[in-house]
Image: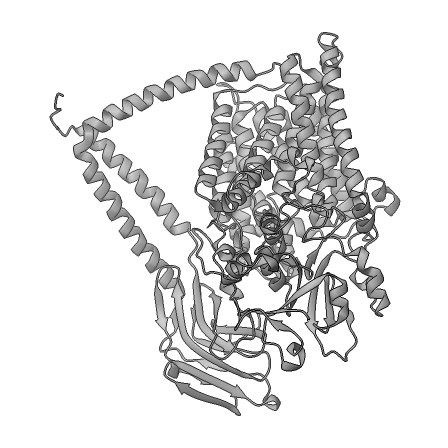
Amino acid sequence: MSTVRYRLRPSYFNSVVLAWLACSLAFAVYTFTRPHHFQLTLEMSSQASSTARLLFDAGRGFRDEDSRMVAVWARPPSSFQELAFDLPHRDISRLRFDPLTGAGRVILRNAIIRSSERVLVRIRPEDLLPLNPGERRTQHGGDVQFSTLPQAGRLSLAIRLAEPLHLRRDTIDEQLRLLLKGNAVLLLIAILVLPLRVPLSEAARHLWRQLLKLDASLAAAARYLSVPGFIVFDLGALRFYILCFVFFVAAVAADLNGSSIGIYSSEYGNGSKVSTWIGSPRAIRSDEWGYQTPAILNQSLRVDRFAFRDSSIGNHSVALTANLPVAHFSTVFRPQFWAFFVLPLDYAFSFSWQCKALLLVTGVFTWLLLMTQSTLWSIAGSLWFFFSPFTQWTYSWPSALPEMIGLICLAMVFACYLTVGRNGIALLLSALALAVCAIDFTLCSYLPHMLPLWWLIVSVFLAWCVSARQQIFIRKRAGLRVIAGVLAIGVIAMAGWFLYADLHQAISGVLNTSYPGKRIVPAGTMPRWQLTSNFFLWAETETNFPPALGNISEGSGFLWLAPVTLLCLRRMTLSRFQKLALAFLWGYCLLMLAWLFLPVPGALVGLFGMDRVPPTRSLHALGLANVAIVSISMAAMRRRSAGERRPFSRIAYFDVASCVFLVFLFVLEATNRNLGSYFSPPAIVASSAAAMILVMLILTGRKLALALALVLPQAIAFGSVNPIERGLQVFTSSGLYKFVQSRPRLLRGKWIVFADSFIRSSFFRAVGCDVYTGMRFLPDLDHFSLFAARGLNPEILNRLGYLVAHPVGQEETPAFKLRVEGVVEWEVAPSDALLRQLGIKYAAFDQEPTPAVSSNLIALSDGPIDGFWLYQLP
């Protein structure tokens, strides 16, 4: 084997330096854009469930809006719950801590102010002081006990700081510290790489040759897959598909998901403690971590695995509509759930979670490619839509919104091919793919999200049929197209027939519920400022948004740039399909805006089913239309020829930019007034400037710059909205999971969980128990007669929502109470014979029951398991 002498050539040295500089720049961008979290954490023991509140003085005194709240659960004196309060990136001079909403006794210890990187301040026990007269303080080592009499009111404490917290400065210090460490490591790697010049060079040349061969094969495949007059694939399109698939496989192989289930241990003290890779669990995702993910896990861990007739979210086969893995023929049409039958549970969950991104991005990309015939703008449009704040903040809604959007986009592409295709095998595959996408879309089963998408896709499909009418009616291979279309319709109809046979009782039951079955939404209920408020998206977080918007998920949206493209129509070279697609898309947008903002007659709205759609449940479809209009317009924007005048002279450019800036400044200032003047003047100016830049990029036709400006900032700002978690250890490593799974008899009877929150029932559900309380898509209709016989009003229970149980004495009468819309409280004695009639065998309490409640119950353990007292009913 010949040896190669090492000689440091200037060209190689320069290459290493440039690579180091590029990596350093990328690391700097990551360092200064990654979120830095500051928290005050402490351990607390309380014998009463309540809510703890931390107030901070950031120069404006103690105000309700400058506070954070965390749920407190009752515990024995020797058991502590860790509370974590997020702190803002401000200078804080004082802290006040209200451990309970009223009087009581608590024990505190281990109070720490920390960042995402290190401990900033360890608060001494001596610095925890009572604020009000009548509060008693005792200290034993590091434990500090506070108590107050019932007539003394709220227990309130002061947290004494040796000096103010300068969290803004600490953020910069941490960023600089991390930047120096990272660059030192990168420099060390560069120095180590220098002696390996020849092997790396040979390996690089070999890898480059292999990539060229792969590109040649992909280019040939692109030519083969392209259909003139329909859709044209190029090398970039296939590279994009492969890249999406590689990311998908890598994420599944690494066992990654975006669930917020870590909140069970961090906020509620249940389950095994875990830490997320990126981001943090989101409390706003309660629908996901509160019932959807536990219901999915319950399907895999229960005794009758993947049951659908009687599941954790209801009976009469309602599980078929709840986006759960089920042992039913319909799962053949739902590939996102196939992994649950062949892979370990955590990897199967990762597979189903990553299908969200894969279906959404590739589906929207293919749909846009059909309309734009531009790979660049299909990639830009799909990623713009994917990283938009609305998509990211609503990503984990149980309605399977990402999958739903991707599936209906793919379904339209396959349907369009069936109208003009010529290849028999491709027609057969398209028919089957159309059937799979259509059935999978239908089984997402949330009409408020489905109907706006349906009408959007129908409008674009009509534009396709009108523009391609000559191709559609060509006789060549017309018989094959008809057969393929009949096959697709037949498969869909047959599957629908058998599904309806299993679901007709559930459909009837849901339609007759008080909510959502009988809910009717009038037109014109959205305030006009809600759309323009979306230009403030850069300044909003989960805990920092205008109260007028309700919450960050309902208040997020898209960058509404479609109207700007109307000013560029003369500079577009549009195909016949693109002209019709734009016309139909604009017609759809105008009708949607009329429904959102105008008092359209209810009969007309009901004709299209839109009276079942709350306004914010249609924004995804309007946002998708907005992305499509901009993508088509920019793809069709012709380049300026050598002798053609610029759209703006240099002087006119600044005049137009100034006018655009002033218009946005005026509009956003008016919007801010409707939001209660929530945003500061700098935020209004910055948002106006960002919008002005995007508008000017459209007007000047700078395609690549606009694509990058639409994707990269949103990817940086919202890419970490979904936490990245590995595995399901919160549940599968918990004490309750091990206790229940080692005693199979506990999985064969129903449980009732007595707690103040439905979250406790969800935790039991996630470890495989059959829980009567908690979320129900469909109430237990078969038990209504039993409830009525005991004097309970089943109409209160007749709604989609949560059932929460509270124990009462044996002599007290059971009752249903509607706490808020969607949450029903059930007051019942654990030894009541009604529970046995309902099939309930076991009971769990989130705090130790009194002797009067537990006297007739049989304890299942010597002490609490994961904070629960477990009993068998007599």
Q: Residue 851 location in percent, x, y?
A: 63, 81
Q: Residue 417 location in percent, x, y?
A: 67, 20
Task: Name the quarter where the N terminus is drawn.
Answer: top left
Task: Name the quarter where the C terminus is drawn.
Answer: bottom right
Foreground pick, 159 / 251? 251
Q: How many marks?
A: 0
* Point 52% across, 64% down: residue: 270
The answer to whether residue 645 of the structure is visible from this angle is yes
827 sits to left or right of 5: right
Foreground pick, 721 / 825? 825
Q: Residue 123 location in percent, x, y?
A: 38, 76
- In the figure, residue 859 lies in which quadrant? bottom right
794 sits to left or right of 227: right
Q: Residue 194 location in percent, x, y?
A: 18, 34
175 sits to left or right of 864: left
Foreground pick, 772 / 563? 772
Q: Is residue 221 above or below residue 492?
A: above
* Point 65% across, 39% down: residue: 404
Q: Is residue 2 above or below residue 674?
A: above
- In the figure, residue 10 lies in which quadrant? top left
Q: Is residue 65 above or below residue 485?
A: below
The answer to whether residue 468 of the structure is visible from this angle is no
Q: Is residue 634 above or below residue 22?
A: above
* Point 53% across, 42% down: residue: 348
